[in-house]
Image (tube, rainbow, N blue to C red):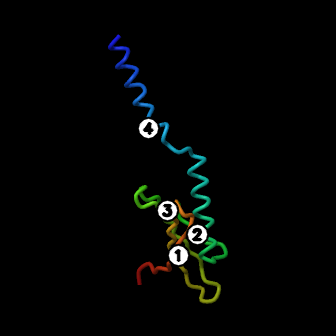
């Protein structure tokens, strides 16, 4: 009886992490929202975007790097977007890669 109780407890504990895991569909929806918000705020027409970089839950942010060739200057414009998972808001900043 004790063996059965221990085996049952171990079985239930091994399934506990699965109950809290997000589905692929939920992650894909979150990434689509982050990309859409970031692209919209960047005002770029058709940028290249990296795969989302997910920070830990304490940070609560997703980063997306975007780049596009400027129509005016013909130079590459690079921006980083930090998307806040809780508020759904994004912050955009331009950056330069090397000199």
Element type at marker 3?
strand
- Residue 78: where, in percent of width, then height? 52, 77
Question: How busy is the neighbourhood of tag 3: few (under 14 within 10 Å), some, or many (20 plus)?
Answer: many
Element type at marker 2?
helix
Q: Quadrant of residue 90?
A: bottom right
Q: For the residues labelled 2 and 1, say whether their Cβ atoms are less than 8 Å apart.
A: yes
Between circles 2 and 4, the one closer to the viewer is 4
Q: For the residues labelled 4 and 3, say whether their Cβ atoms are less than 8 Å apart.
A: no
Circle 2 residue? 38
- Tell me the tag on residue 92: 1
Q: CA distance from mark 3 to mark 2?
A: 10 Å
- Placement of 52 over or under 94, stated as above or below: above
Q: CA distance from mark 1 to mark 4?
A: 34 Å
Q: For the residues labelled 3 and 2, say whether their Cβ atoms are less than 8 Å apart.
A: no
Q: Earlier in the sequence, mark 1 or mark 3?
A: 3
Q: Residue at x 58, y 69 (%)?
A: 38
Q: Is residue 96 left or right of residue 7?
A: right
The residue furthest front is: 87
Q: Residue at x 38, y 24 (%)?
A: 9
Q: Earlier in the sequence, mark 2 or mark 4?
A: 4
Question: How busy is the neighbourhood of tag 4: few (under 14 within 10 Å), some, or many (20 plus)?
Answer: few
Q: Earlier in the sequence, mark 2 or mark 1?
A: 2
Q: For the residues labelled 2 and 4, say whether their Cβ atoms are less than 8 Å apart.
A: no
Q: Residue at x 61, y 60 (%)?
A: 33
- Tell me the tag on residue 62: 3
Q: Earlier in the sequence, mark 3 or mark 2?
A: 2
């Amino acid at each position: 009886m004790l063996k059965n109780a221990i085996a049952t407890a171990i079985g239930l504990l091994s399934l506990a992490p699965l109950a809290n895991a997000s589905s692929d569909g939920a992650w894909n929806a979150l990434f689509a929202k982050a990309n859409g918000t970031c692209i919209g705020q960047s005002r770029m027409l058709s940028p290249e975007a990296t795969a989302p970089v997910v920070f830990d839950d304490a940070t609560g942010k997703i980063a997306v790097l975007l780049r596009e060739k400027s129509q005016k200057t013909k130079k590459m414009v690079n921006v980083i977007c930090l998307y806040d998972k809780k508020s759904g808001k994004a912050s955009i900043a331009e950056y330069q890669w090397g000199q």
